[in-house]
Image (cartoon, rainbow, N blue to C red):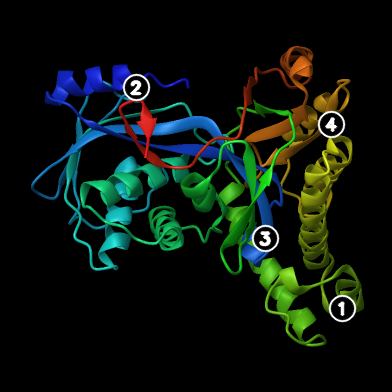
Amino acid sequence: MALDRAKMGREFAVRFSGEPRLFRAPGRVNLIGEHTDYNDGFVLPVAIDREVMFAVRARTDRKVRLAALDVAPQTVFECDLDEPVRTTSAHHWSSYVKAMARALEGEGVRCTGFEGVVAGDVPIGGGVSSSSAFTAAVATLFERLNSLRLPPKRMVELILDAENLATGLRGGIMDQYTARLGKAGAALLIDCRVKEHVEVELPEMTIVVADTRRPRTLAATAYNERRAQCELAARAVATRHENVRALRDVTPSMLEDCRDLLSRDVYRRARHVVTETERTLASVDLLRAGDLVGFGRLVTQSHQSLRDDYEVSCEELDVLAEIAWTVPGVYGARMVGAGFGGCIIALCGAETVGPLTTALRREYMRRCGRETDVYATVASDGASEVTEGAEA
């Protein structure tokens, strides 16, 4: 693990003295199933071995005092859990903390404040869900500091409610679900309608993440627009086909039957979601069979659909994916996350990580004139309290 837990304890002692409790939650990458979660569909994410960690102790009041070691290590920021939640373009950490407390109070819980330090190695704005890692870690510390035992799925819903309140976005549940319930060595096939999952054991492979380092300036606007287009498409199909509540219920033949009801753009958005649902379910069978070549082919098709039909890619994402596709030993590659920046993932064997990393760094600089952060990752466990070298 990259984060030094002993150092977290030392940093806490310098600012607050005494021994803290440690809480962590991971980032995530979605292997396949992009922009299907808010369409009641299926997703196949993994929690990764990069995380946000808090070293804190409870207070007796409603104050929160926190030093963000990655941002301003010498400054202790303060907020009050009774203050209103304000969404800002900066999305200050206090908005997530207050929003999580507000969500728990809806369950009849009055959270105590806390003080401590926070650090993380989940890239911010890189499409691997740093905000959900942060919020899931906050949820876990509130849960443990206040001796709560809410059902796991209910806590996932509350984490989503908190993020939506803090950001003003209408997000799906995949990121929070994975940050909370991820499993080492496995992906989660999540049915986003019923909020149930099955674990899909992964064959031996490495997930390589490459960050465009491009600010995702259009992601929020496009996200809400695409969601509205998907809802419009589902309502149109429902006028001719019974039991259609969301695009998850629509087959390719049903979509074609209703093509005359949809504008060109709305049709293409819906086509991505409908075909992505099929790719995601087919991926489970391929992974269980150990067919990484077949799975990688679907991963690549996912990127092409996101680029051409959903139109949430960008030049930098396309360049990184195209570079990865040319490297021998790469099974497949695609953009992940909301789009217009962020990361790609490439799937390969361990022996391919070195050549792939070299190619991505060299060719991305040549074609886009900027560096890319590249790192390999593995499927890891979801949020937990760290206790004496173990996690609970």
Could you tell me how many numbered marks the image carries? 4
Tag 4: residue type? Answer: Tyr
Task: Tell me, yes or no, whether the two marked residues, 3 and 1, touch with CB atoms within 8 Å.
Answer: no
Q: Secondary structure at mark 2?
A: helix
* Nearest-to-viewer mark from 1 and 2: 2
CA distance separating discs 4 and 2: 35 Å
Which badge, 1 or 2, comes first in the chain's sequence?
2
Q: Is residue 352 above or below residue 132?
A: above
Q: Name the amino acid, label 2.
A: Arg
**Of the pair 164 and 188, the residue shown nearer to us:** 188
Callout 4: 10 Å neighbours few (<14), some, many (20+)? many
Q: Which residue is mark 2?
A: 5
Between the C-alphas of marks 3 and 2, the distance is 40 Å
3D distance between C-alphas at marks 3 and 1: 19 Å
Return the residue at label 3: 226
Q: Name which residue type carries label 1.
A: Cys
